[in-house]
Amino acid sequence: KQEVTQIPAALSVPEGENLVLNCSFTDSAIYNLQWFRQDPGKGLTSLLLIQSSQREQTSGRLNASLDKSSGRSTLYIAASQPGDSATYLCAVRDSGAGSYQLTFGKGTKLSVIP
Amino acid sequence: ETGVTQTPRHLVMGMTNKKSLKCEQHLGHNAMYWYKQSAKKPLELMFVYSLEERVENNSVPSRFSPECPNSSHLFLHLHTLQPEDSALYLCASSTGQGKHNEQFFGPGTRLTVL
């Protein structure tokens, strides 16, 4: 059964710092990996989707990498801003049974201090 | 705004009540999902509908009953719920049946069962 782990569970950084969020998964047989942002009490906003054949994706100040063989992904946020404060969730779509299944981590709660 | 709307945004109900959650997507997608997000737990997939047919049901208790009358609408009918069912219920949609397709989430319904 796929398991997704996100470390750290919470992170607090001063404004302007570059930071890295980590995601690991136990079964490397995946179709893709998706990073989401969730603001308190709100739904999920998709940030980046990396297909299993890709190594990284970039959107603005965000860069996500994928190392499928080692079961790892990182989300790099450059020049962090207070508006980046949110919970960041990583999810993988397995290539095995249950093709619609997205397995989520518990998230990393990011606080960017002005 | 992701193109997926959910109503109501907040719901408080007693254990003997019957209520329904509604989800509507304006993206032309034909797969829709219900997820449950409880405190300190990862998002859990409940149901998946593709082309208005249920394709996944992740061992959800029968007190939760989904309905998908067309590809744009998804309902979750609730009856005789328990306090532990209190959670954020998220709806998502994606295009086609492809395993590579990105899921877009609504804002969620915050459910409290008294």
Image (cartoon, coloured by chain):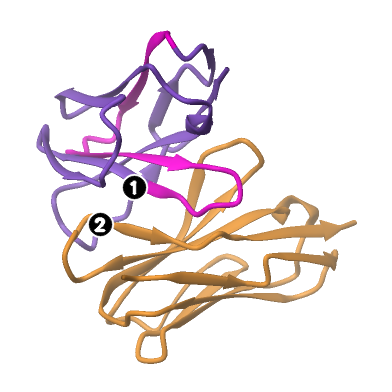
Chain colours: A orange, B purple
Q: Is residue A5 above or below residue B95?
A: below
Please give the residue where the numbered disc 1 appears in the rendered image. Answer: B45
Residue nearest the viewer, comparing B98 with A83? B98
Report the side of A83 relative to A106 (left or right).
Answer: right
Q: Which residues are magenta?
A: B16-44
Q: Percent position (x, y) of residue A70?
A: 41, 91
**Residues packed near mark 1 inside 10 Å, few (<14), some (14 to 19) or many (20 plus):** many
Residue at 31% across / 55% down in the picture? B102
Q: Is residue B34 visible?
A: yes
Asked if the stretch drawn in magenta spans residue B105, the answer is no
Please give the residue where the numbered disc 2 appears in the rendered image. Answer: B101
Q: Percent position (x, y) of residue A13?
A: 83, 67
SS at mark 1? strand
The verdict on a common chain for dots 2 and 1 is: yes
The disc labelled 1 sits on which kind of residue?
A: Leu
Q: Residue furthest right?
A: A114
Q: Is residue B102 above or below residue A68?
A: above
Residue at 82% across / 69% down in the picture? A16
Q: Nearer the viewer, mark 2 or mark 1?
A: 1
Q: Percent position (x, y) of residue A95?
A: 20, 71
Q: Kindly identify which numbered label has been placed on residue A69.
A: none
The disc labelled 2 sits on which kind of residue?
A: Asn
**Residues packed near mark 2 inside 10 Å, few (<14), some (14 to 19) or many (20 plus):** some
Residue at 53% across / 42% down in the picture? B38
Q: Residue furthest bottom?
A: A69
Question: What is the quadrant of residue B52 in the picture?
Answer: top left
Chain letter of mark 2 equals: B
Q: Is residue B86 above or below residue B31?
A: above
Which numbered disc, 2 or 1, marks the residue that appears first in the sequence? Answer: 1
Question: What is the quadrant of residue B23 in the picture?
Answer: top left
Q: In 3D space, how far apart are the residues under numbered discs 2 and 1 (Cα atoms)?
A: 16 Å
